[in-house]
Image: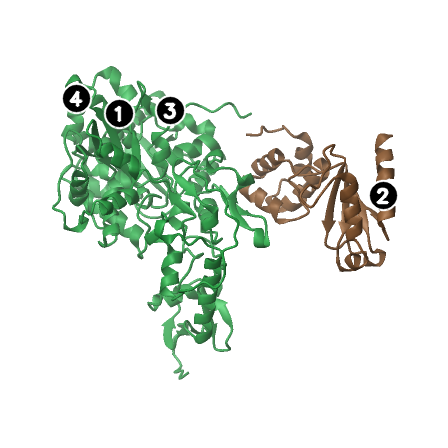
Chain colours: A brown, B green
Amino acid sequence: MPKKGMYPEVDLILKAHESKQSAIISILQDVQKQYRYLPPEVLTYVARQLDLSEAKVYSVATFYDNFSLEPKGKYLIKVCDGTACHVRKSIPILEELRKSLGLSDKKHTTDDMKFTVETVSCLGTCGLAPVLTVNDKVYPSMTPEKTRDLLKQLKEEDNE
Amino acid sequence: MNKIATTNHDEFMWIDGLKVKLEGEKNILKVIRKTGIHLPTFCYHSSLSTYGACRMCVVEDEKGTVMAACSTLPKNGMSIKTNTKKLLKHRRMILELILANHCRDCTVCEKNDDCELRSLAARLGVKHIRFDNNREIQPVDHSSPSIIRDPSKCILCGDCVRVCSETQGMGILDFAHRGADIQVTTAFNKKLSETDCVSCGQCVAVCPTGALVIKSETQKVWDALLDPNKRVVCQMAPAVRVALGEEFDLPAGELVTGKAFAALNRLGFDYVYDTSLSADMTVVEEANEFMKRLEDGGPFPMFTSCCPAWVKFVESKHPDLLDNISTCKSPMQMLGAISKNHFAQPKWNDKDTVMVAIMPCTAKKAEVARPEFVHKGKRDVDICITTQELAYMIQEAGIDLSNLTPESPDMPFGLASGSGLLFGVTGGVAEAVIRRCNAEKTSESLQAISYCGVRGMEGIKEATIEVGDREIRIAVAHGLQNADQLIKQMKSGNIYYDFIEVMACPGGCVCGGGQPIAKRRLTREKRMESIYNADGIAQLKYSDENPQVKSLYSAMKTEDVHHLLHVHYPKPMADE
């Protein structure tokens, strides 16, 4: 059982939302921002502080695709595979990313926890198709070649 | 429709052409049921919130709109049909689609005859399923001592989810994931034994399929009964006798005390005892403890300790209140301990004694396994089976319960007062303790006690009595959600009580998770009434006047009283 005050950063989030049960989604979004995913022990803590059942919080956390119970890499790459991006060849971009990082449709995150590759259904910027985002920064009109360069650049940035 | 204006303000609706008066029903399903039409439902339980997911109760209005009766408000002048070509087709299709994703091993399923899915398929004439079952087989969770959960048999009606959170305030089970991946599960898909589940079994009682069933231990009982080197004794709880008959086509709530003891004798138990006797001892011990607390100044309120689901609830949710729980063992554990003590005498040492408890309760299975109830390496109670399991054993043995000649339990643990029998209903323990504490032992005072406020189905009941010159405030809660509310109000300082009885199941043990599935209307009320009737015809009304209890006390060594009849639940590690 998690002790009160065990997660001061979560306490701040809860305080910002006045520990309201109805704010559970916003609270989980902030928790995910903090940890880059939803650690199970933190969900248990949140449930206890909000006087909700653990299963209810788990229910909300698993309902939305944007919430992740798995740890994510430092760089979260979201490849858009909406209709517009798909017809403008988003799949070769995805394949390039997976190939260079040793990932697959089952394995989304590299072992060194640097990169996570996911697909999203539409980023709402169809005019820039095919598009991907890295930690919410948008990269428009991508190609497999540009993707290779982007990965190289990110790796260099990480080494600095 | 030929409508003749009515002069008063009554409101009506038409069901299959029949004019029906509206009497404040919250949904048209209730209005329909008044007319004697029993629409099929999976996800509707009158005591829970309306969910409207299974769509079995669909009806059609004059415009041909199809709607779920459970979640449609009745309106004046509304006209609906319950059986049309469209509806029959819809219902069959829904059922076929539910069945498409469902395991079809009905003949070996634990739920079998009690399965609503199976019986509805038969009732609606679904004989063939055109689709293969492509559902991924998920592991069955056997981890709980009381409940087996098989997710592959779940039809997602959510009854268990709602009873666990709304009635019991626990929320152990909930929906997880979404769309085609949706499932009912625990937080993080943990095993039931790793959650705070109190094993009350109310989820089993509402589950329409075999997704949640009681963990059966009848084989262990058969093994013991058929072992010539074992002395197998049993005890039967008060609530069993008002429900067992239902499994043998007797009316709901029929009192079958004598027939049940006869059946236990036929099954081959060496001695059959009555848990109501140790309930009498619980009354004596609990009243003494309460009087002692009045002298010592607390701690108050004193909570009853008979319900193992309640004890587990306090341990996980309110560990600070553990000292407030009476130190009395539950009647089942008391009888286990004193009977094992009885058979420990040298003249009985030819055989090992096995104590089997027959309980209306699934949580009792968890209770018998607790380490606190092991004495000198032996359990006070070895096996606990539920009323349902006993019915299966009687059926397996081919015994026709309804035609048995009544028999009585054996001495020295077979005589009980009416007070002991009351342990089976909500308010019963409180009533028995009030009888014990009340100095005036007349039939007038007995009647006065029965009307003091402890009886009935209200979630939280209150009564005030006078002991000596002190006013004692008593509360009775059933359903853990009600108990939780009571505790929260108590902790906020809004209310004060000296004595609180809690039973986890709504209605008390008569509606325990191990009782036969209530298929008929008013089953709960009839079982409760039957317990009060049993008390009514009992010659002895007061626990402390039970001569058998008196002689057991005089035979017990003073130093034994404590370890045989009391228990201290260890406090969990400090939370803060």
Q: Determine which quarter of the picture holds residue B325.
A: top left
Kind of residue at badge 2: Arg
Residue A134, image x, y percentages = 80, 43
Q: Nearer the viewer, residue B350 or B23?
A: B350
Residue A148 badge: 2
Q: Nearer the viewer, residue B1 or A106?
A: A106
Residue B296 is left or right of residue A78, and the answer is left
Q: Which residue is mark 3?
A: B371
Q: Chain of mark 2?
A: A
Give the mark nearest the N terminus, 1 or 3: 1
Q: Which residue is mark 4?
A: B348
Nearer the camera: disc 1 or disc 4: 4
- Whether B106 is drawn above or below B548: the answer is below
Residue A48 badge: none
Nearer the camera: disc 3 or disc 4: 4
Q: Nearer the viewer, residue B522 or B348?
A: B348
Give the mark nearest the N terminus, 1 or 4: 1
- Let me know if marks 2 and 4 both belong to one chain: no
Q: Chain of mark 3?
A: B
Residue B193, image x, y percentages = 46, 34
